[in-house]
Amino acid sequence: MSEVTRSLLQRWGASLRRGADFDSWGQLVEAIDEYQILARHLQKEAQAQHNNSEFTEEQKRTIGKIATCLELRSAALQSTQSQEEFKLEDLKKLEPILKNILTYNKEFPFDVQPVPLRRILAPGEEENLEFEEDEEGGAGAGPPDSFSARVPGTLLPRLPSEPGMTLLTIRIEKIGLKDAGQCIDPYITVSVKDLNGIDLTPVQDTPVASRKEDTYVHFNVDIELQKHVEKLTKGAAIFFEFKHYKPKKRFTSTKCFAFMEMDEIKPGPIVIEL
């Protein structure tokens, strides 16, 4: 095992333990954030095509399954339903598997599958996404108007209230695009960045859009800002990146984006430019 791989496995193991610790202490926001960041790193490694990886294809598949379990636990912490949850006790069984991934040869303990092969990005890597400059032609590229497969997203719960501090909830209703019906698995990534582009809060993804109608993609989801408005630095802005899956290139692409500056935040509806 190379030093690079040894260091990588140590970082993954430490991240998994941190998430489980937060989970056991009831610090759910921190646990969800840790699980989701680790899941994206694992998914990225599981989908890596480079030749210098020390992981075999079967090991990459196991890494992808661990990522799926992390996503399931994250979703369970955000769910109000108790049935079919992926429990903390289940998650703790993953640590020895991840630690000994190079020698692990037993059957994976959970009936899960890695996520489909797509380019998965960790928070802060969004700038590496491809931006589309031209509208793609051709009809029938997208699924039916009503989506059959729902993606859970990575939305986080509302923060506890503090005296004299303002919490912000943003409802994303819909986005207007001339080729809305052709977008596959569309969702929106919401981030809060400072003047240097540094994330001030955890990045959140909406679930896949609920429906497409004419020239609109409908979401109707609430985003809970993960920092009190008064604690945001001067010049901060809230970014909304519209993303969709491109099957021919097999990755998720940013089609367009919009942003709100802090002086635009006020009660009631607002339409922002793409």
Image (spheres, rainbow, N blue to C red):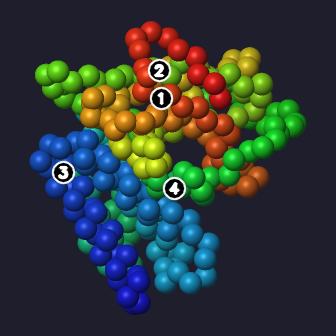
Separation of residues labelled 3 and 2 (CA atoms): 35 Å
Find numbered disc 4 in the image and state the secondary structure of the residue it sits on.
loop
Separation of residues labelled 4 and 1 (CA atoms): 22 Å
- Which amino acid lies under the numbered mark 4 shown in the image of this protein? Glu
Residue at the image position 50 percent from the left and 28 percent from the top: 260
Residue 264: which numbered mark, if any?
Answer: 2
Q: Quadrant of the N terminus?
A: bottom left
Along the polypeptide, which appears first: circle 2 or circle 4? Answer: 4
Instruction: Give the image quarter of residue 112.
Output: bottom left
User: Which residue does the numbered mark 3 point to in the structure image?
Assistant: 22
Along the polypeptide, which appears first: circle 4 or circle 3? Answer: 3
- Which amino acid lies under the numbered mark 3 shown in the image of this protein? Phe
| Rendering coords of residue 126 (x, y %) | 54, 51
Residue 63 is left or right of residue 161, and the answer is right
User: Which residue does the numbered mark 1 point to in the structure image?
Assistant: 261
User: Which residue does the numbered mark 4 point to in the structure image?
Assistant: 125
